[in-house]
Amino acid sequence: MKMIAIGNNFCERDRETLLLYPAGKALTASVYGKMLGMEVAYLGVLGSDVETEHITDTIKQLELDSSHCQKYKEGEEQPFRLTEEDVSYLKDFDLIYMEHKKELLEQWNDISTEKGDILYDFGDQWTREQIQKAAGKLNFASIKCQTKEETIHICQQLQQCGAKGSIGFYGEQVICFDEHTYMEETMNKAKADDQRGMEQAYVIAAIGALKEQKELSIAMEAGKNFAEQIGREAGYFAHSVPIIKMYGTSLCKDCVHSLEEIKRHQYPVEFRDFNDKLRNLKHFLKIREANRELFKEEIEQGTIGIPLFVLDDGTYTKDEKVAFERIEKQLAK
């Protein structure tokens, strides 16, 4: 099955562990599709900041097709809109996951599919008007509601408008509809190590099964099993990196000393070695140029100013002691 996911990507900061996790509903959906054996593409907007770098690296590691992603430089961000080429590209896919976005609903009438089904994820930030607009064109849907009555009512509305299947969440419960009936079960999130991606994992696995003409009970079993699998992962699908960065080079004795301390204390710090990737040096030079006062002494003396630490709040320090005290303080919370 070929699946494409359209929508957001970002990095989520875990302040307890000082780790940065890839996130965003559409990006996560594409990863889950890949984990389930689908041929997957991701379509969204990729910026140019350090966090987007981690997103891009993750996409490459997982071998997701991001060839149609829109790329913006810093300060050039624009509202996400599908191009004519994107709309044509969607016709190649069997399942089109669409994250709930106002911009996508504005283009709703422009989107056409030949062989594919649309899975629209309303999430929990929806309105009745938006549901009415999307109903009739979507083939599958997921939504989060407040009560059982509301969940059943909206899913029934979607089914009456032609949906092949819909999944509604409220509290710990999930209600699944196919074209004939509906069933309900408990998610058991309390047993999970990390609940963050469980509902979406359930949706991708269960809808994938319904798309393959599986019975509703079998689809729900697939959803539950995959959700429990994801619940054992840290973050949405692991692939974390430390929030705190250290720029430098292994040829510098001060950097080597800091690295030894980091290893000895097992601090969560990402070392951005100039010798490893040229872009690490480029980022450092960009930081140095934007913070000339911090590097005033080095600029005057013709030295570099490393190691440089980027702390969890985005501030910079060249003082190893300050950086390590910050880490100890955050980890002790």
Image (cartoon, grey):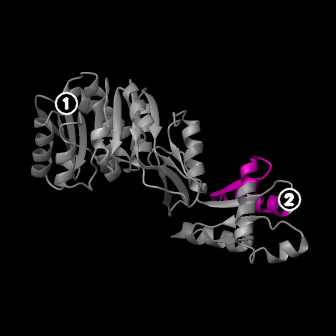
Disc 2 target residue: 252
* Secondary element type, mark 2: loop
Q: As rendered, which of 85 and 292 lies closer to the eye?
A: 85
Residue 66 visible? The answer is yes
Q: Position of residue 3 (x, y in %)?
A: 39, 30
Q: How packed is label 1: few (under 14 Cα within 10 Å), some, or many (20 or more)?
A: many
Q: Amino acid at mark 1?
A: Lys
Q: Is residue 16 above or below residue 190?
A: below
Q: Which image quadrant: the N terminus?
A: top left
* Marks 1/2: CA–CA distance: 61 Å
For the magenta stretch, what is the residue range?
A: 254-281
The residue located at (12%, 50%) in the rendering is: 148
Q: Is residue 158 above or below residue 250?
A: above
Q: Is residue 4 left or right of residue 296?
A: left
Q: Is residue 79 magenta?
A: no
Disc 1 target residue: 164
Q: Quadrant of residue 290?
A: bottom right
Residue at the extreme right of the image, as rendered = 301
Q: Is residue 26 left or right of residue 130?
A: right
